[in-house]
Image: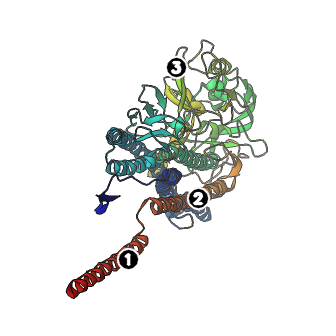
Amino acid sequence: MTRTSQGMGAGVEVARIRLATDRFLQAASLSAGAEAARQSVRYELYDRVQSLFGDPGGANGFFSQVDAVFAAFAASAEDPTSSPRRQEALFRTQALFDEAGRIGQQIQAVREDADGRIQSAVEKANNLLKQIEGLNLEIARATVHNGDASGAETAQSSLIGQLAELVDIRVTTRAVGGVSIRTGAGTLLAGEGAATLSYTRAGTVTSETAFDEVWVTEPGGQKRSLLDNLVSGEIKGLVELRDIEAPATAERLAELVAHVADELNRAHNANSAVPAPASLIGRNVGQSFESAIAGFSGQSTVAVTNASGIVQARADIVFSGATMTVNGAAATPATFLTVLNAQLGGSAIASFVDGKLSIAAGGGNGVAVADDAASPSNKTGRGFSHFFGLNDLISTDRPAFYETGMAAASPHGFTAGETLRFRFTGEKGSKLRDIQVSVPAGGTVGDLITALNDPGTGVGRFGEFALAADGSLAFTGYGSPAPKLSVLEDTTIQVPSGVSLTELFGIGGGVRASRADGFSLRSDIRQAPARLALAQLNLAAAVGASALSTGDGRGALLLADAGERAANFSPAGDSSGGSISVSRYAAELSGEIGGKAATAKNRNDTASALATEAAARQTAYEGVNLDEELVLMTTYQQAFNASARLIQAAKDMYDTLLGMI
């Protein structure tokens, strides 16, 4: 501003410096920055997840190992007596499940990293809000006294930019000076005091971890869910990766690995080692024997053979729902074991303890089980030996499939009063409600489902559980999008198996994803490759005839073809499941993971470019244009030179006039 004194120029005076801002450009820059931060963390962390699987087309990638397992068994079929080929097949099988376990654990490590970064982001946001609110007071004081607040406004603008990278915000100017900040959904963060964000990280993260809510307490004391109000920003991206994308990948991995194990076990249960093993010890079926043995159809044979493969005794079983015969002798689910042992004549003993069926031979003999070729035994798509896991190749420490075969009238085996606690979360990850459900007094599966679906004491207001014909239990949420169900706590213990209700039916994605790191090659086969079952029992052999022979490799062909057999995959992650082969499912999962990683990169690149452009335009408006300043300086310099020459000319003329006098 020009200063004058008695009508004459007296220089200039700086009255006040104002920060030049364009609110539209500022809002666009903040929004673009928030989205760039969101996509950046999603790409960074999902790229880590994708790298765990290795190159999909490489020889050492995880999905290549799936094909290598079946190829190794095919090689064993060519020379079933070759110990090196057996060892190679077993080595590749164990390596596959070891790698699956490692990947599953590393996915959870990525989620744990995301969870820790959420807590760090919350702490950073709190610090920024305090500083912004402190500058609000300083700017307001300067405004009241007509002072210079440009320094505080510049510093505040920088802090707002950092806050926008954490959460999406809307900024408005206050009449008294400073700014008011709200989330995109309207929650007040600053302007009338600083809001406080709170979050407690989970610590060690597993597939079944339930995370705390991220809360924001407004300056007025109102406590709200922050996730309900988030559209973009780093915290939003971290929550999406932790709660949606990484769990979906873990569930798909577990579903694949579980079916690889199940199909190998299907083939191995149809085979026998030579000589046959002295005992067959099944897996924990998670229910009483009476419930487990009911519902079979078809025919199966239990044979006792000596070291040379000669049949010493055999029991031919014909199943027909709740009734059955053993060598023509009638049996019921309650009397089946008694009748079976009687027909084996003491050459082998069948027993059921802690949810596991076992058949042990005596006198140095072995046991083999095979289904009739024309009418194989079947329950929920699995044969007698396969359903009970009598000759599994791959063992696991928890239920691997959830087609229990139980009906509404089946006893569930849980004790009345035991509880489960569920959590329902919304589309954006915010908690809707925690619900605790107690096991009812009624002892059937139907009674249990009724209690679960009760609108008052159960989950009936959010969705319903339904029992399928194969005994699997599925939850369907109400609404679109439907709320997500997870299990916070399960105190139930099934008698006699000892498994929980969540484990038995696979309730919630967490318990299903946990299967990935629970598989391993059966220990006795790993130690003695000769126990690998590559032969098949000859059901035409009567007692006294040979039913097993060394060099029989037909069972190895079943193992080699296991990857091409259609299996019934359950919904997992973004997949709706359905009937598909293991090899095809692995190929689709490989393509999905690669596609998601590429999409995340494209979104990150696009969001970063948009944020850069928005920031550049804001800077162009608010910053100093050096070219323009150079032109102005040149103009002012030339004007100064002209004025100086004018003064000099006037002085010379005055001097000349004085000299003439």
- Earlier along the polypeptide chain: callout 2 or callout 3? 3
Secondary structure beneath dot 2 equals: helix
**Which residue corresponds to mark 1?**
634
State the separation of the CA atoms marked 3 and 1.
Answer: 83 Å
**Which residue corresponds to mark 3?**
419
**Which residue corresponds to mark 2?**
599
Residue 377, percent from left and from top: 72, 38
Q: Is residue 659 above or below residue 282?
A: below
The residue nearer to you, when weighing 36 against 361, is 36
The residue nearer to you, when weighing 281 against 127, is 127
Q: Quadrant of the C terminus?
A: bottom left
Q: Residue at x 47, y 46 (%)?
A: 238
Q: Residues within 10 Å of mark 1 (few under 14, many from 20)?
A: few
Which mark's residue is nearer the viewer, 2 or 3?
2
Q: Say if residue 50 shows up in the picture.
A: yes
Residue type beneath disc 3: Thr
**Number of marks in picture:** 3
Q: Residues within 10 Å of mark 2 (few under 14, many from 20)?
A: few
Q: Residues within 10 Å of mark 3 (few under 14, many from 20)?
A: some
Secondary structure beneath dot 1 equals: helix
Rendered image: mark on residue 31: none
Q: Is residue 152 left or right of residue 455?
A: left
Q: Residue at x 67, y 26 (%)?
A: 464
Which mark's residue is nearer the viewer, 3 or 1?
1
Residue farthest top in this picture: 441
Q: Is residue 309 above or below residue 505?
A: below
Residue 54, percent from left and from top: 50, 62
Q: Is residue 225 left or right of residue 326?
A: left
Residue type beneath disc 1: Thr
State the separation of the CA atoms marked 2 and 3.
Answer: 42 Å
Residue farthest right in this picture: 374
Residue farthest front in this picture: 661
